[in-house]
Every structure is written in structure tokens, then in C-alpha cells.
Amino acid sequence: MNKKWAVKRITINLATSEMEKLQEYCQKTGRPATDVIRELIRSLETNFSIDLAENAIQPEKLTTHYGKLLNCLK
């Protein structure tokens, strides 16, 4: 399979415990951190319902997917 990547480099700040959890997960699964983070980002839902009157995103949808990402890095 031929992959074409539009490269955009990002830097994230993680607490020591978050980094340790990510490293432990990567070691146990044999996967690089980049692949794990990329998979988590792909799993995020981007079709949120927005109430224009209140300009608010439905919190139950946001917290579900954001929580998955945070839980993986804790």
C-alpha cells in the first residue's frame, strides 16, 4: 500500500504520567506512539451538533471522544 502523507508536525505537552502511560501502551502493543496518537485522532467525531443560538457543542458527544483520548494518555 502506497501512503501519501501531507505532513504537518505538531508538538504536544504531556504530564509525566501521560507520557509514561503512552510509552507503556506502545511497549505492550509494539506500536510507535505516532501510530497510536494518529489512530486516536482518527477516532474523534467531527460532526457535532451546534446550537447557533447558544453557540454550544453538545457536551456529551465532545466529552465521550475527548475522554477516550485523555484516558489513553493518562
Image: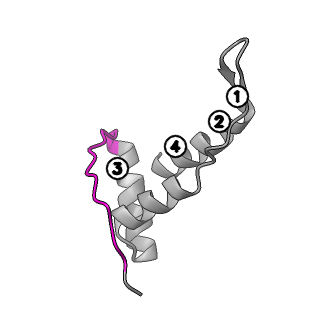
Q: Distance between the residues labelled 4 and 2?
A: 12 Å
At horizontal 32% and vertical 43% (from top left) the residue drawn is 16
Could you tell which of marks 1 and 3 lies nearer the N-terminus?
A: 3
Is residue 6 on the magenta stretch?
yes
Residue 46: x and y in percent read 61, 44
Instruction: Identify the amino acid type marked 4.
Output: Leu
Mark 1 surroundings: few (<14), some (14-19) or many (≥20) residues within 10 A: few
The residue tagged 4 is: 70
Viewer-nearest residue: 59 or 26: 59
Q: Residue furthest bottom?
A: 1
Residue 9: x and y in percent read 25, 51
Q: Distance between the residues labelled 1 and 3?
A: 27 Å
Identify the mark at residue 19; answer none if there is no mark.
3
Main secondary-structure element of the magenta-colored stretch = loop
The residue tagged 1 is: 59
Residue 33: x and y in percent read 35, 63
